[in-house]
Image: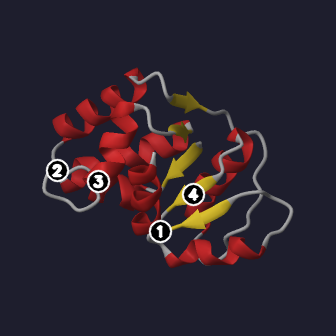
Amino acid sequence: MKVVLDTNVLLISLPHSSPYRSIFNGLRDGAFTLVISNEILSEYEEILSVQTTPEIAQNVIKFILALPNVIEQQVYFRWNLIHVDPDDNKFVDCAIAGGAKYIVTEDKHFNGIKKEEFFSLEVINSDAFVEMILLI
């Protein structure tokens, strides 16, 4: 199962005491395939640096890139499906280019793409994704 994680989901999955830690553990254990682009990696590192420290951010990025179940996807076309916050389009574009089944996010800006029938892409929240991982 190919997945794109919004930055907010990555952040809430990192603390050991988080109820969403199973997302990070699932990534580590190969329960799903993470699809990322350079733009997504840059945002991960930028936000993690602010929320933690630059060293922790770099370690998380190195860890992600070392995993065999991570696909680095080039994005050649911009769909511009999110108009409210165009910066979020990087996640949609990566998911479409990489053939991801899910975008996992807590961001309401992604709700608009649920209406797109052309793509077999679903937007789900962290709780729904945790339930999926626990079933694997």
Secondary structure type for disc 3: helix
Measuring from the top left, give residue 31's x and y in whole percent: 45, 38
The answer to whether 7 appears left or right of 74 in the picture is: left
Residue 79, quarter of picture: bottom right
The answer to whether 109 appears left or right of 62 in the picture is: right
Could you give the CA–CA distance between mark 2 and mark 1, rounded to whole angstroms?
A: 23 Å
Q: Amino acid at mark 2?
A: Thr
Please name the residue shown 17% across and 52% down the image: 15
Residue beneath disc 2? 52
Q: Amino acid at mark 4?
A: Ile
Residues at badges 4 and 1 in contact (C-beta under 8 Å)?
Answer: no
Q: Which mark is residue 103?
A: 4
Residue beneath disc 3? 13
Could you give the CA–CA distance between mark 4 and mark 3, rounded to whole angstroms?
A: 15 Å
Circle nearer the N terminus (4, 3): 3
| 115 lies above or below 24 | below
| 116 lies above or below 25 | below
Residue 42, quarter of picture: top left
Measuring from the top left, give residue 102's x and y in whole percent: 60, 55
The answer to whether 76 appears left or right of 28 in the picture is: right
Could you give the CA–CA distance between mark 4 and mark 1, rounded to whole angstroms?
A: 8 Å
Please name the residue shown 32% across and 26% down the image: 62
Please name the residue shown 39% across and 21% down the image: 66
Q: Is residue 34 visible?
A: yes
Mark 3, mark 2: which one is toward the viewer? 3
Residue beneath disc 1? 125
Mark 2, mark 4: which one is toward the viewer? 4
Give whichever of 27, 78 is nearer the camera: 27
Circle nearer the N terminus (2, 1): 2
Q: Amino acid at mark 1?
A: Asn
Measuring from the top left, give residue 55's x and y in whole percent: 17, 34
Please name the residue shown 84% across and 68% down the image: 117
